[in-house]
Image: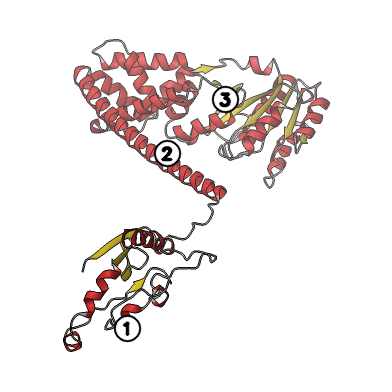
Amino acid sequence: MKVKKFTAATSRDALRKVREALGPDAVILSNRPVDGQVEILALDNDDVASLAAPAVDSEMAQPKPNLQLQHLEDLAPAPAPAAAPAFLSRRLQDAAPAAPIAPAYAEPAPTYAERRAPAAEPAIDMSAMTSMMSAAISQAKESAAAEMNGMMSEIRAMRGLMETQLAELSWNATAQREPQKATVLREMLAAGFSATLARFLIEKMPATKDALEAMRWVKSVLTRNLTTIGNEDALLEQGGVYALVGPTGVGKTTTTAKLAARCVMRHGPDKLALITTDAYRIGGHEQLRIYGKILGVMVHSVKDEADLRIALKELRNKHTVLIDTIGMSQRDHMVAEQVAMLSGSGADVKRLLCLNSTSTNETLNEVVRAYQGSGLHGAIMTKMDEAASIGGVLDVVIRQKLNLHYISNGQRVPEDLHVADRAMLVDRAFRNRGNAAADADLPLMMAAAQSAAAREVNLG
């Protein structure tokens, strides 16, 4: 007896192979799926008789194989020995339902491979996929940008550290080679001047070994670069419209009254008009009205640009018009609105910035930048009598190229208002100076000054 094995993708193909090899009367021994294919073990019908030769006792003594024997087609039974077991005569229609053969007119039964095939995937929403891809790309870009910003910050920090160390090394070498420069630096810092201006002057200083000669050169350079009116006739005789601007508490109202008194003494009360925009501070306009009443000058109050335009039009026959503006912080967004109101008043309003001598260098720089607008006509130093040192305000006036008109050193009207004297101011800056910086701090200050100068160049 020879059992043959047939494999195919489907049961139908496997049965066709059996039929072609063993004929239509072949007996099916087993039908099972193996590795995604159908495997059939079949036996030729002529070999079935050999299974009936053993006796019944021996047949019962041996275990019967668990086989399912099937014929291929439902035909008339072929002749078989009388002693053949009953289970060998079963036809294909009696076979186990492992591989049923469907009639010709019926729908073919699904094969094992078809039953094992994965279910069809649902349709993909292309719009959703596009949105997901866009979100992923945006997230990747943001992550890359954040990483790049972090790297640039680290690089800038490393660059700043290297520049600081190099500047310190350079200054130490310079101080050892030219000790008079270290002396000049200490004196300028003690007087209140910025390290940036001091570094600039030291770099331009001619070669000298005398510290006193170096200080004389520095004072002469500061005096030449400090711009003042020199003579107040240019202001009092020319006349015009002047607006005093500046932060709160800098002394604008008192300074306005001092200027008004000078104008009255020069041209009389009929040639002067006073305008106040301080309608917010309690008693702000009343203070100027008291001064106006003493001087015999009418004080006009305005609220906005339209009122100011009308008032200036009515007062166009006046020789001098002084405007006392409301004080506000240099960081207040209303500063720009105030500058725009004065510029759009329809008249040539010259703005005089009041600088508090007691403020720090950084604060004064912020004030100038905030009130600069299209350009300042000049500046007035106030509260000079309260300042421990005036180097800081002189530093700002020099570096910002402001035209210094007056200095105010008290509350008396009009005595405590003086025309700016360049030589006197520079000399006083170095006479009334604070504590000198320690030698150990000078390299770090010079490095900071170099970094600040580099930032100013980058800012244009």
Question: For the residue labelled by badge 1, is the local secondary structure a helix, a strand or a loop?
Answer: helix
Q: Mark 2 belongs to which amino acid?
A: Ala
Question: For the residue labelled by badge 3, is the local secondary structure a helix, a strand or a loop?
Answer: strand
The answer to whether 154 appears left or right of 76 in the picture is: left
Judging by the rendered image, the residue that carries numbered circle 3 is 379
- In three-dimensional space, the C-alpha distance between marks 3 and 2, rounded to whole angstroms, equals 46 Å
**Residue 55 locus on image (x, y percent):** 18, 85
**Residue 305 locus on image (x, y percent):** 75, 33
Whichever of labels 1 and 2 marks the residue nearer the N terminus, that label is 1
| Disc 3 and disc 2 in contact, CB within 8 angstroms | no
Above or below, 288 relative to 129: above
| Residue 382 seen in render | no
**Residue 121 locus on image (x, y percent):** 49, 56
Q: Nearer the viewer, residue 365 or 170?
A: 170
Q: Residues within 10 Å of mark 1 (few under 14, many from 20)?
A: few
Residue that extends furthest to the top in the rendered view of this protein: 207
Q: Nearer the viewer, residue 136 or 225?
A: 136
